[in-house]
Image (cartoon, coloured by chain):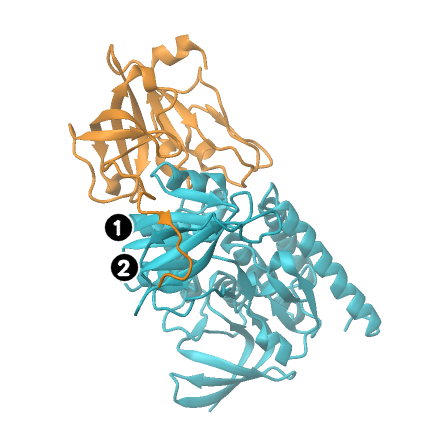
Chain colours: A cyan, B orange
Amino acid sequence: MEKKANVLVIGAGPAGLCAGIETGKSGAKVIVIDENTRPGGQLFKQIHRFFGSEQHHAGVRGFEIGEMLLHKCKEAGVEMMLSSVVWGLSPEFRAGVVREGKRSMTITADKVILATGASENSLMFPGWTLPGVMGAGAAQTMMNIHRVLPGKRALMIGSGNVGLIVSYQLLQAGCEVKAVVEILPRVGGYKVHANKIARLGVDILISHTVLEVRGRERVEEAIVGRGDRNLRPIPGTERTISVDLVCLAVGLTPLSELAWLAGCKFGYFPLLGGFVPLHNRGMETTVSGMYIAGDASGIEEASTAMEEGRLAGVGALESLAFISAAEADSRRKEIEQNLLMLRKGPYGDFRHKEKEKIYSEWKKVKEKAGGYH
Amino acid sequence: MSGKRLKKRPVVIIDCPEEIPCNPCETVCSQGAIIIGQPITNLPVTDEAKCTGCGRCIPVCPGLAISLLHYDYSPSEASLTVPYEFLPLPKKGQEVFVVDEKGRYLGKGNIIRVIPPEKNNRTSLVTFSFSKKLYKKVKYFVLKRENLIDETRKYEPGKK
């Protein structure tokens, strides 16, 4: 089977859905494709209220934002293809797809928007393969999507926002959180998130890490210890905590295999999760007509992902002449204002700077290649 | 905060120490008593004279960082209203343990009022009373008094 579209959006998380809405509502034939059985990416397991301003659905819970976006997709006439894995992407924008693990097909598109998100990082230590050691995101999926409690007594590794939020949600689900350990000498995530669990008696052990997890058939206890300034464990500081769940919240890595396949140029931006496809302010990669948005373009959060998805959509629309250059500029201006606001403050400034570096790297590559095509 | 204002009527306490782009507390306040302005990463500033103590800002804060302090709940007790997202909900009259910001036990308290979760999009509001002497330290309450890392013990190398 062969299918055609003006715009193929790969990934139906916040970035992909917003890209779909933006392009669909202006008349483009859009397919949003996702390997999962349900759209929404990570939004439907976010049961907490989001930060932001009024136009960013502040105070609204993540899954409710997901519902809003799905509704808008429907209104915009976006075609949603679920349980569909994109296994390859040629430079001519022909995507190889397997549907429901059985049927094979191809989709050819004029423009491609990659919104493939990120994957959780792992951490290796003795016992890390024991059942009961899992990504914090996995624990969140078990609890909030499948309604299965992943354990009764948890240890959280990592105090970024993911670690803090999932700890809180574990408490909400009735799991005891024995401690959160953080290798750095300070809490990584928002103080308000840390306060939410600290006042309930959860110890946040800074300058600590997990040394070993033990158990016969599954996790029975974890050994944590203090680390020195060079992040090396200090002998004699070890202690054992009785747990049946160890969650790893140690960062995310952009999922960008399809960008490699399509020949996009990359840069290494460790503060944004590692290798990131270079892109310009309008989210176009070094491959003309191929855009990227959300965590795949550098780890941030859902609000910026939604704005980036829109930006990518505007670029695709303009180059396909669905909207005028003036219209595109005015939409871009508004979105860029929003992004500027979201990338402010102690948790935003560095992301703004890193993104600027990506834009200028993109420019260098394009100039070397002999101008803008 | 002036002692005079504290004794007059309930007042909001906002524990929002970092510049996060967020402003629903400002938007929801009909009295203009919470000011953030532009950019919205500014820290919220409370105009205590304008705050009527209505508490509408409590459930809208995504950081669950707002509470309402009523110093003169009774001659001997103060009360605090906090957002609460756990089940089971405490019952009016129930005895609870009041804690500080680190979850450290401060004393006993009593549940005065519970606004159920459906009123504020799944965030309950719980008001509890406690000794006036503790009003500066009390941040929250818990139903069970537990030391969460009491099971820790010395690591023995080689022990499986």
Q: How many marks?
A: 2
Q: Position of residue A33 (x, y in %)?
A: 47, 75
Q: Amino acid at mark 2?
A: Leu
> Quadrant of the rendered structure where residue A194 is?
top left
The mark that comes first in sequence, 1 or 2, is 2
Q: In which chain is the residue bearing label 1?
A: A
Residue at image mark 2: A149
Where is residue B93, by image quadrant? top left
Q: Are marks 1 and 2 on the same chain?
A: yes
User: What percent of the width, then of the height, locates residue A334?
Assistant: 61, 50
The amino acid beneath tag 1 is Gly
- How far from the left and from the top, in percent, is residue A15? 52, 62
Residue B81 visible, this orientation = yes
Along the viewing direction, whichever of A364 and A328 lies nearer the viewer: A364
- Residue A168 visible to the viewer: no
Chain label for disc 2: A
Front-most of residues A125 and A99: A125
**Image height of A318 relative to A53, above or below:** below
Which residue carries the number 1 mark? A174
Residue situated in front as seen by the camera: A245 or B55: A245
Q: CA distance from mark 1 to mark 2?
A: 8 Å
Name the residue: 20% across, 43% down. B88
